[in-house]
Image (cartoon, rainbow, N blue to C red):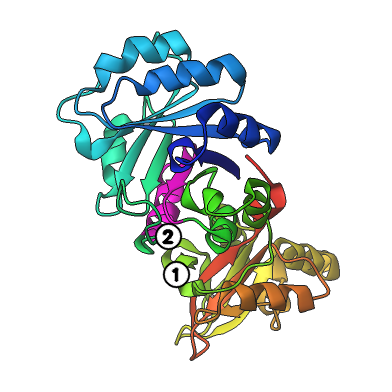
């Protein structure tokens, strides 16, 4: 996950000195908010003179087209338009080679991205009230991020607002590509220290698993009383998560079947492939978490295991399966 440092959150520092300090710590982007203010582009010119770090421009204007010539001239790498401020149809000319993104506030449905998907390559979730420095992250964005990733698998996800070290961990785990960091970065005495905290896995838990897990509708689940070997293979293939969960008629988890479990069962029953019982494949003692546990609880549990974890089912207090969490994005690293 990449970090886009919100330049105007560091108001107490000279622009040149701030850029040089952020470059020394190798931030990935300089995030610049332009609230319909053309003088912002003077700052971008100054940055261009002293830095090669890509610009991440957030353009908040009812008429973004009046800035297109400047965007093209300065070869700005990322340009995000604020959906709620747009008053008419937008046609971004092909001469602008920037990666185009659409920003939406927490109350706006992700469905509005549909009419922008052919030209825009990412979405920016504004997880706090726009313009409110130090605001609190709105938890409803967790579900929106999961829903967007499912619906628009090829598009990137950026998040801005209220991000601290715990949220950084969660968002990395959810596969977010870029986070915009403002007040957290500059309220620390040392920018380098804040950046290290954002990339750390040693976090204090306040959010619960149920806040950010993949819900049951988005995870592979099969009922034990009617499942076939083909069902298992199709479930693993369709969801592309490397496993499927097995539950009883009440939704209580009986176990999971992973790619490895299928392979081991095939080896054990090689002489009788047509008659492999699904029950032979079920791992009835898998790693799992409860939906009321925190990030800290998860990390402590993972550290106690003697095998690597790519995913875990999520149970409620009655041991019913309610979702899953994946860890492959942490393993893949930055994207």
Disc sitting over residue 211 in the figure: 1
State yes or no: residue 92 in magenta.
no
Q: Residue at x 69, y 47 (%)?
A: 333
Name the residue carrying label 2: 142
Disc sitting over residue 293 in the figure: none
User: Which percent across, then down, holds residue 297?
Assistant: 63, 78
Q: Quadrant of residue 117?
A: top left
In the image, taking residue 315 as reference, residue 27 lies left or right, namely: right
User: Which percent across, then down, holds residue 122?
Assistant: 43, 35
Report the span colored magenta: 141-162
Q: Nearer the viewer, residue 264 or 178?
A: 178
User: Which percent across, then down, holds residue 255?
Assistant: 63, 79
Q: Nearer the viewer, residue 125 or 223?
A: 125
Q: Nearer the viewer, residue 141 or 307?
A: 141
User: Which percent across, then down, holds residue 4?
Assistant: 53, 39
State yes or no: residue 161 in magenta.
yes
User: Do the numbered discs 1 and 2 sit on residues whose CB atoms are within 8 Å?
Assistant: yes
């Amino acid at each position: 996950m990449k970090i886009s440092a919100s330049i105007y959150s560091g108001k107490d520092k000279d622009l040149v000195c701030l850029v040089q300090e952020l470059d020394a710590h190798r931030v990935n982007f300089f995030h610049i908010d332009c609230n319909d203010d053309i003088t912002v582009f003077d700052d971008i010119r100054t940055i261009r003179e002293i830095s090669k770090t890509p610009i991440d421009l957030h353009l908040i204007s009812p008429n973004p087209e009046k800035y297109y010539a400047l965007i093209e001239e300065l070869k700005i790498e990322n340009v995000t338009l604020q959906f709620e401020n747009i008053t008419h149809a937008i046609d971004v000319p092909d001469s602008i080679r920037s990666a185009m993104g659409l920003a939406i506030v927490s109350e706006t449905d992700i469905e509005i991205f549909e009419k922008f998907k052919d030209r825009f390559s990412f979405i920016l979730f504004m997880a706090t009230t726009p313009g409110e420095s130090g605001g609190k992250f709105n938890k409803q964005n967790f579900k929106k991020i999961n829903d967007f990733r499912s619906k628009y698998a090829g598009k990137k996800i950026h998040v801005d607002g209220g991000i601290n070290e715990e949220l950084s961990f969660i968002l990395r785990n959810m596969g977010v590509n870029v986070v915009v960091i403002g007040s957290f970065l500059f309220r620390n005495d040392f920018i380098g220290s804040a950046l290290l905290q954002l990339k750390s896995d040693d976090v204090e838990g306040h959010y619960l698993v149920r806040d950010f897990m993949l819900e049951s509708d988005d995870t592979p689940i099969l009922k034990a009383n009617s499942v076939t070997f083909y069902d298992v293979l199709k479930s693993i293939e369709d969801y592309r998560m490397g496993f499927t969960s097995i539950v009883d008629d009440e939704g209580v988890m009986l176990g999971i079947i992973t790619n490895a479990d299928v392979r081991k069962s095939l080896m054990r029953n090689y002489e009788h492939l047509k008659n492999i019982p699904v029950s032979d494949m079920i791992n009835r003692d898998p790693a799992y978490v409860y939906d009321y546990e925190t990030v800290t609880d998860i990390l402590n549990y993972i550290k106690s295991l003697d095998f690597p974890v790519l995913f875990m089912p999520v149970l409620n207090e009655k041991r019913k399966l309610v979702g899953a969490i994946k860890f492959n994005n942490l393993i893949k690293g930055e994207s």
